[in-house]
Image (cartoon, helix red, strand yellow):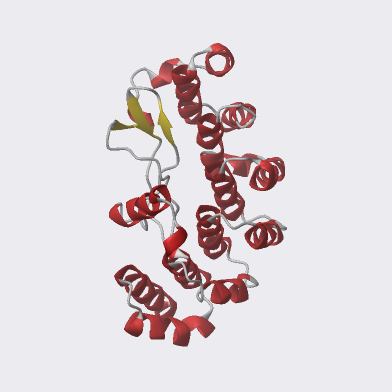
């Protein structure tokens, strides 16, 4: 319950609201010591955001990192394996400028790092480049989802599985959802189920709408809007009219509009 939440948990959830967490998606935020590097943003319903506090850092796009085009795969791999933390972070961020196959190879190496920030930065980039070898990436993402000790890395893996839309992803995500009590991972999985588009997710999302955690309800409602199953319309209409949480009402209205226009 809310009464047992730590101050840090409440702060993390508060940041999601303050950031307007729906519609802002950061592929990767990496603390390089002096700069927090953002590897891109994209619009989207219920896309997950990284929850690290960023007030102390300047923010730049990785595509704007000076000299990005000067690095080849060999140089970046050397930075990843022998460099300081800032160099390793930069290597992962610059990987997106490589040809897809080289980029994927470097990211797959990076997700084995002992540094959770490096693992998170790597898995967060795999949604797009992973399409060059979806079976290989699905295996890695599934392992991280189950076994990684950091919830941010697990959440990134859930995003990748949803984005790849490969057979078997729903079963992996549903099982992970049932087996975790980490709200951030639950949020990512619920949001991803909408993007995944597997109609079996309907019952899972409807069940999540009864959660005591408002953020999970918001994720479930948004995902139902993406899923496109019109059976959800009466449930979402009620939330749009009666939900006390303004974020939940807004998301319900957005999802409702999407369903009715489909």
Q: Could you tell me residue 158's position as x and y percent?
A: 59, 51
Q: Could you tell me residue 183's position as x and y percent?
A: 52, 57
Determine the residue positioned at 43% across, 45% down. Answer: 50
**Side (left or right) of 24 relative to 143:** left
Of all residues, the one furthest to the front in this rendering is 3
Q: Could you tell me residue 61's position as x and y percent?
A: 34, 33
Q: Could you tell me residue 172's position as x and y percent?
A: 70, 56
The quadrant in which residue 3 appears is: bottom left
Image height of 15 relative to 71, above or below: below
How many numbered discs?
A: 0
**Side (left or right) of 34 relative to 82:** left
The quadrant in which residue 54 appears is: top left
**Side (left or right) of 163 relative to 173:** left
Determine the residue positioned at 31% across, 31% down. Answer: 60
Image height of 29 relative to 14, above or below: above
**Side (left or right) of 134 relative to 163:** right
Location of the C terminus by quadrant is: bottom left
Determine the residue positioned at 37% across, 58% down. Answer: 22
Image height of 190 relative to 145, above or below: below
Instruction: From the viewer's side, name the closer residue of 239 and 183.
Output: 183
Instruction: From the viewer's side, name the closer residue of 8 and 114.
Output: 8
Instruction: From the viewer's side, name the closer residue of 144 and 72.
Output: 144
């Amino acid at each position: 319950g809310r009464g047992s939440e730590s101050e840090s948990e409440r702060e993390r959830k508060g940041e999601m609201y303050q950031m307007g967490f729906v519609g802002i998606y950061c592929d990767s935020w990496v603390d390089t010591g002096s700069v927090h590097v953002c590897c891109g943003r994209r619009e989207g319903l219920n896309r997950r955001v990284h929850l690290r506090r960023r007030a102390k850092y300047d923010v730049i796009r990785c595509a704007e990192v000076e000299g990005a085009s000067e690095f080849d795969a060999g140089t970046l791999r050397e930075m990843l394996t022998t460099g300081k933390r800032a160099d390793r972070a930069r290597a992962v961020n610059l990987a997106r400028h490589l040809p897809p196959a080289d980029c994927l190879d470097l990211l797959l190496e990076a997700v084995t790092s002992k540094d959770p920030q490096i693992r998170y930065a790597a898995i967060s980039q795999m949604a797009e480049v992973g399409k060059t070898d979806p079976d290989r990436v699905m295996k890695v993402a599934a392992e991280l989802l189950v076994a990684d000790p950091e919830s941010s890395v697990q959440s990134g893996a859930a995003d990748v599985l949803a984005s790849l839309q490969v057979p078997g992803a729903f079963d992996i995500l549903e099982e992970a959802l049932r087996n975790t009590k980490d709200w951030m991972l639950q949020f990512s999985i619920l949001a991803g189920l909408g993007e995944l588009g597997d109609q079996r997710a309907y019952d899972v999302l409807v069940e999540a709408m009864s959660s005591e955690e408002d953020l999970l309800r918001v994720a479930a409602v948004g995902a139902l809007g993406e899923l496109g199953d019109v059976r959800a319309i009466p449930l979402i209409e009620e939330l749009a009219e009666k939900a006390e949480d303004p974020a939940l009402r807004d998301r319900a209205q957005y999802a409702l509009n999407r369903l009715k226009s489909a």
